[in-house]
Image (cartoon, helix red, strand yellow):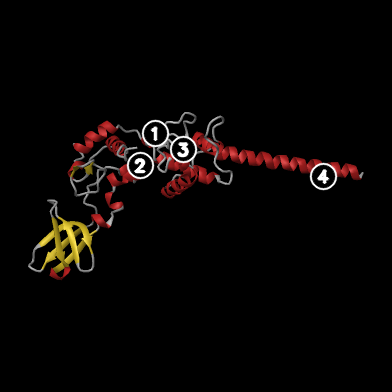
Amino acid sequence: MRDRKRRTVLIRSLCGLVVVGLSLWSTQAIAQESENPFTGRVDIRMGQGQFESRCSTCHGLEATGNPEGGGPDLTTGRFRTANSDSGVFRVIRDGIRGTAMIGINPDASDQVVWQIVSYLKSRSPSLVAGDLPGSPVTGQQLFAGKGDCARCHIVNGTGGRLGPDLSHIADRREISELRTDLTNPNAEVDPRWWTLIVTHNNGAVIRGLRMHEDSFSLRLMDPEENLRSFSKSQLGGLERDKRSTMPSYAQSLTTQQQDDLVAYLLTLRREQ
């Protein structure tokens, strides 16, 4: 009787272990096959830190490859053994058998692996641009033509200075942020791009972009791109317009044209 009870307890225990094991296997499989749940800007920054500490010996600090370490460039968007985020996840987690690519340390959580995937995706123009139905060629034409963007923005040394330099804008902004920049430029305005309205003691009023300001002086750039410096003791008044000088393209460009312009902006990255 006692032996039968012991066998029953043993069988139940083994069944429990099997259930737990299957549960863990299922959870791991789901984690590897589901869409990346960690794609925000903070996740990308965290993924960059994890990549630099765990992967850069072979692939370089900026994921562009390391001839001495033997790791390939991971910023091209093309991987021989993976064609999706979940595929990249599995390569990072498990490695590639028969190659120098070993899996990440088992102590790394799934969240860490997904964040590394997000970082690599942010470094890859083709992966990011593929998420948006737009033509970079048409977008470049819009940038120089109907959009009149070059009047205020520099790209690779050419253009105006009344807006941020966009030469490497895709290294700093994501698709959603670039679209917001086009349709709602007032959503996020860096103080560097506020407009100052200066009233001089002699009554003259000068408007310009805020270049520098401290307790005693300020410097601005007027609409003709002339730099003007003032001592605050000379001023009769000072106002700050925190709105963007950039117009919204929500009505002046169609949705397709906005997609095209964003697709072009996504090509503006540092040379790899």
Specify the quadrant that holds the N terminus.
Answer: top right
Q: Which mark is residue 46?
A: none
Which residue appears at 51% of the width and 43% of the height?
A: 113
Label 3: which residue?
69
Label 1: which residue?
76
Horizontal side of residue 62 vs 36, given as left or right? left
Which of the marked residues, 3 or 2, is nearer the chain's N terminus?
A: 3
In the depicted structure, whether residue 59 falls above or below residue 186? above
Discs 2, 1 touching: Cβ within 8 Å: no
Which of the marked residues, 4 or 3, is nearer the chain's N terminus?
A: 4
Which of the marked residues, 4 or 1, is nearer the chain's N terminus?
A: 4
Label 4: which residue?
9
Discs 4, 3 touching: Cβ within 8 Å: no
Report the amino acid beneath label 1: Thr
Discs 3, 2 touching: Cβ within 8 Å: no
Depth check, front residue: 225 or 24: 225
Q: Which mark is residue 175?
A: 2
Which residue appears at 21% of the width and 42% of the height?
A: 157
Residue 37: tell me if it is visible: no
